[in-house]
């Protein structure tokens, strides 16, 4: 016979043990659902650059990259034509005044020098010979003039004696002889005067002829000196000390007069030329202080020139270097420069996000306190430096935002960070 057994009734907490667990699961699910509501994109934390908002002073600066260049660069040109025979210097070499930069050869010019020297020597000898001849001719004329003077004095003495006899009434001298003596005195006087005039004219002619010959000799000497200078200029020398900037000549290359040989820069007269983005250059003014970084030293300077033209979205800004230059500086040295634009006291700032522009409204991804969710929020930027930007609205101190490129998730309002 079967015995009917009545089952023992379980306590309530045993029969519904799963209810608290289910409640916890539902509550946790609700919390997670609320937290991750509208999360539509997952991004790796390692791919993000995150920075926090801080309070304090903000130094507004603009960064640019460029090179040190010589403020005075001198081109050295060929003053005579020739063929390159030797190039003793290379770019980067320091040269003193008078150092040979390039040696040229020109056989035709050497022959012209020999011909010019012979021509000058011949003209010089001709000038001396002509001077001797003219002096001899002048001496003959002066001799003739002296003889004419003697003849005149002799005739006059004879006339004076006869005149005294005639005045005494003596008839020793005939009237005809007396008159002949008078005519002789006049004749010798005229001859003497004419000889004196010939001497004067001869001296004037001799001076004019000698002056003309000396002028022709000077022209010949000048032509000779030109050829000598051209031969001397076959050795192209530095006119001052400096650093050779370029030297592209090859042995055997033909050089024409006026061709550029090289350019030399003064190492003690350098300026920094940096490229600044067009959007940032509007904040820069002449006289603003700057700091030029040569990777080993920092050199203070001031903005001395702003190029008015824009090339490839950048503007050239020139910085005058101040104080004694470090020994490593040289032309064409790559440098980085920070130009101080403004100083903002007691403000909020954050590392400058990608695409952030000064004095503009934008959106950024702000992280929650746990740092696992970033939500898009609107912000208002103020002034900006190269690395940091002022935050006027939308963020508070210690808020953290994504400052790296958000292009991969820019269409999502909330993202999950793992």
Image (tube, rainbow, N blue to C red):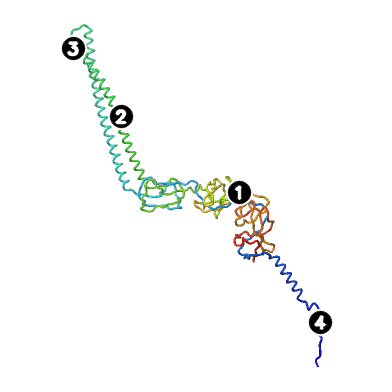
Nearer the camera: disc 2 or disc 1: 1
Q: Residue at x 76, y 74 (%)?
A: 19
| Earlier sequence position, callout 2 versus callout 4 | 4
Q: Is residue 244 left or right of residue 308?
A: left
Q: Which residue is mark 1?
A: 341
Please report whichever mark, 3 or 4, sits nearer to the chain's N-terminal start. 4
Label 4 neighbourhood size at 10 Å, few (<14), some (14-19), many (20+)? few
Q: Position of residue 173 (x, y in %)?
A: 18, 10
**Cα–Cα span, label 2 and label 4:** 158 Å
Residue at 81% x, 82% y is: 9
Camera-nearest label, 4 or 1: 4
Q: Residue at x 33, y 37 (%)?
A: 219
**C-alpha separation, residue under disc 2 versus residue under disc 3:** 47 Å
Distance Cα–Cα, label 3 vs label 4: 204 Å
Residue matched to label 4: 9
Closest to the camera, between mark 3 and mark 4, is 4
Using the numbered discs, state the Cα–Cα distance from disc 4 to disc 1 in whole angstroms. Answer: 85 Å
Q: Which residue is mark 3?
A: 177
């Amino acid at each position: 016979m079967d015995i009917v057994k009545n089952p023992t009734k379980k306590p309530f907490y045993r029969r519904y043990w799963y209810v608290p667990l289910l409640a916890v699961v539902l509550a946790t699910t609700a919390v997670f659902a609320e937290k991750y509501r509208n999360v539509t994109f997952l991004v790796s934390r390692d791919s993000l650059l995150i920075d926090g908002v801080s309070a304090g002073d903000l130094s507004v600066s603009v960064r640019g990259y460029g090179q040190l260049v010589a403020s005075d660069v001198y081109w050295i040109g060929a003053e005579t034509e020739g063929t390159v025979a030797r190039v003793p210097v290379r770019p980067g070499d320091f040269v003193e005044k008078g150092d040979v930069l390039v040696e040229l050869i020109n056989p035709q010019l050497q022959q012209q020098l020999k011909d010019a020297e012979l021509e000058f020597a011949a003209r010089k000898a001709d000038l001396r010979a002509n001077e001797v001849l003219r002096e001899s001719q002048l001496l003959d004329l002066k001799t003739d003039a002296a003889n004419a003077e003697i003849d005149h004095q002799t005739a006059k003495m004879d006339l004076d004696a006869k005149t005294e006899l005639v005045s005494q009434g003596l008839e020793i001298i005939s009237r005809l002889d007396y008159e002949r003596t008078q005519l002789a005195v006049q004749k010798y006087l005229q001859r003497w005067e004419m000889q004196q005039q010939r001497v004067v004219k001869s001296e004037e002619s001799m001076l004019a002829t000698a002056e003309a010959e000396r002028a022709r000799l000077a022209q010949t000497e000048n032509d000779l000196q030109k050829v000598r200078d051209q031969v001397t200029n076959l050795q192209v020398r530095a006119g001052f000390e400096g650093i050779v900037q370029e030297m592209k000549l090859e042995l055997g290359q033909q050089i024409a007069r006026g061709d550029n040989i090289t350019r030399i820069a003064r190492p003690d007269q350098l300026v920094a030329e940096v490229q600044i983005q067009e959007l940032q250059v509007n904040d820069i003014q002449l006289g603003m202080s700057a700091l030029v970084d040569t990777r080993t030293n920092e050199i203070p300077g001031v903005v001395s020139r702003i190029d008015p033209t824009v090339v490839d979205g950048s503007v050239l800004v020139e910085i005058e270097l101040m104080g004694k230059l470090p020994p490593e500086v040289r032309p064409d040295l790559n440098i980085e420069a920070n130009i101080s634009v403004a100083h903002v006291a007691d403000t909020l700032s954050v590392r400058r996000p990608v695409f952030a522009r000064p004095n503009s409204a934008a959106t950024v991804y702000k992280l929650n306190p746990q740092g696992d969710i970033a939500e898009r929020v609107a912000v208002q930027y103020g002034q900006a430096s190269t690395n940091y930007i002022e935050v006027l609205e939308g963020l508070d101190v210690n808020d953290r935002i994504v400052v790296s490129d958000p292009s991969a998730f820019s269409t999502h309002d909330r993202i999950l960070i793992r």
